[in-house]
Image (cartoon, rainbow, N blue to C red):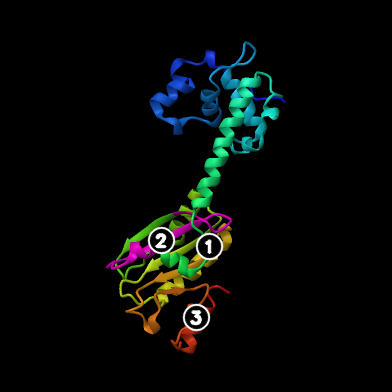
Amino acid sequence: MNYEVAPRIEEMATHERPQERLESLGAKALSDAELLALVLRSGTPDIDVLSLSRNLVDDAGSLARLLTRSRDDFLNYAGVGRVKAVQLAAILEIARRVSAEQAAELPTVDTPDSVWRVLRSRVMHLEVEKFYVLLLNRKNRLLRIEEVTSGTATASLVHPREVFRAAVSAGAVAMICAHNHPSGDPLPSAQDIRITRQLREASRVMQIELVDHVILGESQHAIAGLRYYSFSQLSHRNSNFSWTTDYGYAVNQVFC
């Protein structure tokens, strides 16, 4: 392999070396190779630890892809002996287990009812509208919840760029939008329909799936006892509420 020529660690000014950079700037400021170098601690007479770490990361393509490598794979690298190969195998196995544990703890959000359960405690008794984005991975597991905007019930609360900025930042492949109606009635307004159409169109351009837009209310205040309204599943079809033809048609077209 032909690796990019970079300064050896002994050629760097003291303040540029990984340990000093971590102490002064924090771990987040370090590159993948620098972090790996701090774990390996030392190189050999032929290759310093930072160059060795760069070679390992560059050859794999990324730090994440190192997770696919085994102890025997590491033994093929100049500068990696039995001890370092075992160190690397142990460290990457820890990373795999932590990642698997975190993934298992992420709740699956794939129905309007699951959106309601996740957000209910946040929106109960609010006197203002808040707009949330639930950011999802490929398996519809919740990565995080972003509160995008907050304001009065009559104001225009959100613009698609604010929603998708949060999605891109989180590396989400899908998302569910949700907002509350302080009145408790979750049935959509004309403005809700309009913004949902805009979000739907933007999702196609951004190639980040808009799974649903859910309006949250309180069943005791809602027509037909609805506690939420789902644009995707059109929950009004399963209720006793009768839509007017024009209004029903407008909503039906949003997720077509």
Distance of label 3 from label 1 (alpha carbons): 18 Å
Choose the circle earlier in sequence order: 2 or 1: 2
Note whether 221 is above or below 8 in the view shown: below
Residue drawn 46% across the image and 89% down it: 244
Kindly identify which residue carries mark 3. 250
Boundaries of the magenta span: 119-144
Q: Looking at the picture, tell me which residue is in the foreground, 187 or 91.
A: 91
Residue drawn 49% across the image and 57% down it: 107
**Three-letter code, disc 3:** Ala
Does the image show residue 6?
Answer: no
Percent x, y for residue 37?
Answer: 54, 24
**Three-letter code, disc 1:** Ala
Kindly identify which residue carries mark 2. 132
**Magenta stretch holds residue 133:** yes
Kindly identify which residue carries mark 1. 202
Choose the circle earlier in sequence order: 3 or 1: 1
Q: Secondary structure at mark 2?
A: strand
Q: Residues within 10 Å of mark 1 (few under 14, many from 20)?
A: some
